[in-house]
Amino acid sequence: MDHLTEPGIRDHLLQSLEQCKQMKFTYYTYVMNIGLFILFVLGVSIILYFKNKKKLTTSQKNKKNEDDRLYIVNRIRSLQLDKLSNYKN
């Protein structure tokens, strides 16, 4: 089979194929790096969005604090009434 080609053609073809392989590897690496970077940025953005979305607004915080305060006051009153009724009995 060697006698069917010119003496330098085989080496030239192998070198050309090696260059194509290297170029393809560089291209795939470049595309993979950009794709992973986009996925990373997208993931961090989604996490930050949902973290921020969970935060209560100022009015919601005030309402929650007021509800908590009312619950505690009512619980103390009921315990005091129970204690007073037990003391009277």
Image: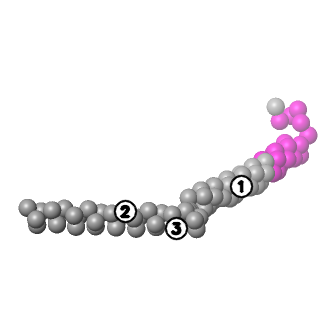
Residue 37: x %, y % from top left: 70, 57
Q: Residue furthest left?
A: 89
Question: Can you tell which mark lies on residue 38?
Answer: 1
Residue at the spot of label 2: 71
Cα–Cα span, label 2 and label 1:
48 Å
SS type, badge 3: helix
Please tell me which residue is depicted at 44% across the width and 62% down the height of the picture: 67
Cα–Cα span, label 3 and label 2:
14 Å
Where 47 falls versus 12 (above or below)? below
Q: Are marks 2 and 1 in contact (CB under 8 Å)?
A: no
Q: Residues within 10 Å of mark 3 (few under 14, many from 20)?
A: few
Quadrant in which the N terminus is drawn: top right
Amino acid type of the residue tagged 2 in the rendering: Tyr
Instruction: Specify start and end residues of the magenta stretch as a single range.
Output: 2-23
Residue at the spot of label 3: 62
SS type, badge 2: helix
